[in-house]
Image (cartoon, rainbow, N blue to C red):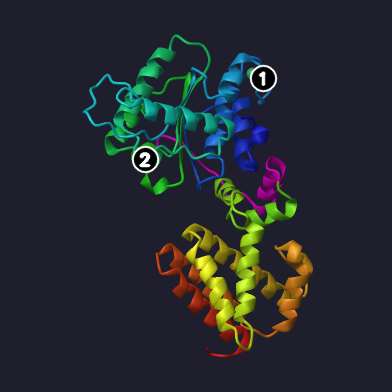
C-alpha cells in the first residue's frame, strides 16, 4: 500500500506527507469519515512509509522494495499491528491471554483469510463471524507489544480499525495507552462512527477528517482496477455515494442487466392499454426470484435513470446524462413526456428503495410505485 494506491484523499495525503517530511508524526491520530473511503488504506500507507528501510528525508515515499516494505504489503510487519473486532470466546479471559488464545482453529483460519484479503485490498472491511467488539484482551495485547518495541528498531504503528467497536472496558484501557506517549509509537484509530468514540480518547488524538470520494475519482479507480468499461464504472460510481467499498459490492452485480429489467418493467407499466398482464409477469419474475439487495439496486438504478430523463427534459444537454450508453433511449423518453412531474416519480422510486430495506412485501412496493408512474406520465389513476 503506497500513497499512489490510495484513491483520492489528496488533502489528507498532503497533510500526512508534510508531517513525514517535517518529522512531526503525531503520537495518535483519529481518521474519521464515512465507510469505504480509504481510512485504513491511509493508515497502512503511513505505517509502511514510517518503516521503510531505504527511505531518506526529504522523501515521503516508501521504496516498495526493501524487506520492510514487502512485509508491510503482506500485513506481516512486526512493527505494524492491525486491531479489529474478534469473536467472543466462551470461557472467561485471564489477564495475560492473547486475544487469539481461545479461538478455534477455524476462527484463526478465518482471521488469516480476512487479513490476506485486507493485504491485497486495504478497502476490504475485515468481517469475522460473531465479531462485533474490540475487547480488552486486544488492547492489553497492544500494550504488551508497545513495551516490547522499546528494544526493536523502526517505528511501531498500531491501527485500530473501526475503533468505535471498542467495549467501554477496552476504551478505558486504550485511554491509558494514549496517556503514555512513546516517541517510536503511533496509534491510529479509524472510524465511520466518530460519535461513538469517547470524548476523552478523541481529545488525545489528532483528528483527521477523510472526504467521500468524488464520482470522477471512483470511476477512474474502478475502470483501472477491474475489468469493466468506463461506462460501467461511471454507473457504479454514481451509485456508490462516494464509497469505494460500496462500489465494490456493486461489481458483482450485473448492473446493465438489472437496469434493463427495471426499465422494461417501467415501459410495460406505461402502456396505455392492456398493461396489467405483462407488467404482472415481469414483476413476478423480479420480485419473486431476486433478493432484497438486488431489488433495491434495481430501484436505485431506476432512480438514476429517471434523473437522467428529468435532467435531459429540462436542459436538453445530453452531456449531463450519467447512463451514457442509454442516451438515445433517454432522449426518446424525455421527448415523449416533456411535461411530466419527474420529481414526483423520482421521489416515489426513492421511497420504494427505503421500503425494500424496511421489509415491505416487494410486489406491494412495485405496484404502488408503478401506479405513481402511470399517474405522473400518463395522467391516469389505475
Ligand atoms: Zn522500503
Magenta stretch bounds? 203-227
Q: Which residue is mark 2?
A: 165
Res 36 quadrant in image? top right
Residue 57: assigned label:
1
Tell me residue 247's x, y (percent).
Answer: 59, 50
**Is residue 199 visible from the viewing direction of this image?**
yes
Q: Is residue 356 above or below residue 76?
A: below
Task: Identify the residue shown where x is 46% and y is 69%.
Answer: 362
Horizontal relation, residue 92 to residue 381: left or right: left
Residue 160 among those drawn in magenta: no
Task: Identify the residue shown where x is 74% and y is 51%.
Answer: 230
Q: Is residue 355 above or below residue 273?
A: above
Disc nearest the viewer among 1 and 2: 2
**The N terminus lies in quadrant:** top right
Q: Is mark 2 within 8 Å of ligand 1?
A: no
Task: Identify the residue shown where x is 51% and y is 60%.
Answer: 290
Q: Is mark 1 within 8 Å of ligand 1?
A: no
Horizontal relation, residue 261 to residue 224: left or right: left
Tell me residue 357's x, y (percent).
Answer: 44, 62
Q: Residues within 10 Å of mark 2 (few under 14, many from 20)?
A: many
Amino acid at each position: 500500500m503506497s500513497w499512489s494506491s490510495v484513491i483520492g484523499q489528496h488533502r489528507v495525503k498532503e497533510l500526512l506527507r508534510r508531517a513525514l517530511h517535517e518529522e512531526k508524526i503525531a503520537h495518535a491520530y483519529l481518521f474519521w469519515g464515512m465507510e469505504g473511503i480509504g481510512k485504513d488504506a491511509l493508515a497502512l500507507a503511513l505505517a509502511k512509509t514510517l518503516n521503510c528501510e531505504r527511505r531518506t528525508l526529504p522523501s515521503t515515499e516508501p521504496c516498495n522494495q526493501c524487506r520492510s516494505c514487502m512485509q508491510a504489503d503482506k500485513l506481516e510487519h512486526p512493527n505494524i499491528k492491525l486491531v479489529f473486532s474478534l469473536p467472543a470466546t466462551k470461557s472467561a479471559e485471564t489477564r495475560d491471554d492473547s486475544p487469539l488464545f481461545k479461538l478455534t482453529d477455524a476462527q484463526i483460519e478465518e482471521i488469516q483469510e480476512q487479513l490476506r484479503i485486507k493485504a491485497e485490498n486495504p478497502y476490504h472491511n475485515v468481517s469475522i463471524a460473531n465479531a462485533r467488539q474490540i475487547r480488552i484482551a486486544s488492547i492489553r495485547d497492544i500494550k504488551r507489544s508497545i513495551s516490547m518495541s522499546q528494544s526493536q528498531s523502526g517505528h511501531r504503528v498500531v491501527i485500530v480499525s473501526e475503533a468505535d467497536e471498542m467495549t467501554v472496558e477496552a476504551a478505558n484501557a486504550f485511554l491509558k495507552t494514549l496517556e503514555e506517549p512513546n516517541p517510536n509509537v503511533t496509534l491510529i484509530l479509524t472510524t465511520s462512527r466518530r460519535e461513538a468514540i469517547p470524548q476523552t480518547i478523541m481529545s488525545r488524538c489528532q483528528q483527521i477528517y477523510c472526504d467521500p470520494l468524488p464520482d470522477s475519482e471512483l470511476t477512474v479507480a474502478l475502470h483501472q482496477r477491474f475489468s469493466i468499461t468506463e461506462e460501467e464504472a461511471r454507473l457504479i460510481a454514481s451509485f456508490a455515494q462516494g464509497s469505494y467499498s460500496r462500489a465494490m459490492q456493486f461489481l458483482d452485480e450485473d448492473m446493465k442487466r438489472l437496469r434493463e429489467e427495471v426499465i422494461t418493467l417501467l415501459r410495460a407499466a406505461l402502456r396505455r392499454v392492456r398493461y396489467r398482464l405483462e407488467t404482472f409477469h415481469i414483476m413476478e419474475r423480479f420480485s419473486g426470484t431476486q433478493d432484497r439487495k438486488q431489488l433495491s439496486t434495481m430501484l436505485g438504478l431506476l432512480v438514476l435513470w429517471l434523473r437522467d430523463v428529468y435532467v435531459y427534459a429540462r436542459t436538453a444537454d445530453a452531456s449531463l446524462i450519467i447512463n451514457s450508453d442509454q442516451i438515445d433511449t433517454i432522449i426518446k423518453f424525455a421527448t415523449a413526456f416533456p411535461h411530466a412531474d419527474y420529481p414526483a416519480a423520482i421521489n416515489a422510486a426513492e421511497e420504494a428503495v427505503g421500503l425494500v430495506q424496511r421489509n415491505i412485501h416487494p410486489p406491494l412496493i412495485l405496484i404502488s410505485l408503478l401506479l405513481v408512474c402511470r399517474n405522473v406520465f400518463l395522467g391516469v389513476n389505475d
